[in-house]
Image (cartoon, grey):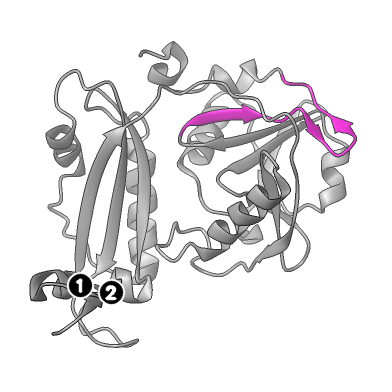
């Protein structure tokens, strides 16, 4: 195969590597993981999402794959906090119709800062991006264009964060986080039917709240619901980001109730 990269000839080996289905069609999914000294506190949640995602996508990842061993190989000993990115895509060639359902994967690590409680001073609603719920909208697909465009809108508006709605006008999530809110002593989060991603921190917190006897309620809610709540919190693999204000509505920033449920590595915040 002959190919040009930015107008310059490249080797046949590199050209062949760029022909993978993840690059060509976004045919796969990815995971972003935080690791401390070779241990991933949310590994079981990542495993669960990977299994569910690949089942829906009909991509066959070998049962023998030892992700924990791969993580320790990349992050041995006292490497501190690392951010790992795992890509999984369908192997083989073919056009829209795959010739294989077997998986290929790439795991890469880079240094990361320790999780911290970071407040969002003020956020707003997206006006340019609408999410469309589907059987696979909970998956972190390689084709994450809606979130790229939402962060572009965020930059243009100089906003700290945007809330994304679905085609029915219901609250789905933020650009890079799930949402939780508290109203009359109960916690709520958008249901997966809203089109939000099934976040690993979302799953962790929901399980911990059930163990506490105070389950989180999954709901489909209109934007004006957020004007009636006491607390609003963004959550993702990096931890919690309490929101202080949405429009003229101000929120209580005390999220100790949720912070106390995070993995020990997050709460102890080792450097």
> Residue 249 falls in which quadrant of the image?
top right
Point 28% across, 75% down: residue = 7
With respect to residue 67, does 182 lie above or below? above
Horizontal relation, residue 145 to residue 180: left or right: left
Which label sits in the foreground, 1 or 2? 2
Magenta-drawn segment: 238-253
> Residue 62 falls in which quadrant of the image?
bottom left
Query: Which residue has dot 1 on it?
Result: 91
Horizontal relation, residue 182 to residue 137: left or right: right
Query: Which residue has dot 2 on it?
Result: 21
Q: Secondary structure at mark 2?
A: helix
Q: Position of residue 250 (x, y in %)?
A: 85, 28
Q: Position of residue 38 (x, y in %)?
A: 21, 27
Point 34% across, 38% down: residue = 44
Residue 25: in magenta span = no
Q: Nearer the viewer, residue 34 or 101?
A: 34
Q: Are marks 1 and 2 in contact (CB under 8 Å)?
A: yes
- Give the mark nearer the N terminus: 1 vs 2: 2
Q: Nearer the viewer, residue 170 or 175?
A: 175
């Amino acid at each position: 195969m002959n190919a040009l990269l930015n107008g310059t000839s490249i080797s046949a080996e590199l050209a062949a590597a760029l022909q993978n289905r993840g690059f060509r069609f976004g045919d796969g999914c990815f995971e972003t993981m935080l690791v401390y000294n070779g241990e991933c506190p949310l590994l079981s949640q990542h495993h669960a999402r990977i299994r569910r995602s690949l089942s829906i996508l009909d991509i066959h990842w070998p049962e023998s794959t030892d992700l924990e061993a791969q993580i320790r190989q990349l992050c041995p000993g006292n490497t501190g906090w690392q951010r790992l990115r795992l890509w999984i895509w369908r192997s083989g060639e073919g056009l829209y119709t795959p010739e294989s359902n077997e998986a290929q994967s790439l795991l890469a690590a880079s240094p990361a800062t320790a999780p911290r409680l970071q407040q969002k001073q003020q956020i707003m609603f997206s006006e340019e991006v609408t999410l469309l719920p589907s059987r696979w909208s909970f998956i972190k697909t390689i084709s994450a264009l809606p979130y790229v465009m939402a962060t572009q809108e965020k930059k243009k508006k100089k906003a700290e964060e945007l809330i994304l709605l679905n085609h029915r006008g219901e609250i789905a999530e933020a650009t890079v986080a799930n949402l939780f809110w508290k109203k009359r002593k109960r916690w709520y989060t958008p249901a997966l039917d809203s089109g939000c991603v099934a976040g690993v921190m979302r799953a962790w917190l929901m399980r911990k709240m059930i163990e506490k006897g105070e389950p989180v309620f999954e709901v489909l809610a209109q934007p004006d619901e957020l004007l009636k709540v006491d607390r609003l919190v963004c959550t993702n693999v990096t931890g919690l980001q309490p929101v202080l204000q949405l429009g003229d509505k101000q929120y209580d920033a005390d999220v100790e109730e949720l912070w106390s449920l995070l993995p020990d590595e997050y709460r102890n915040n080792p450097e």
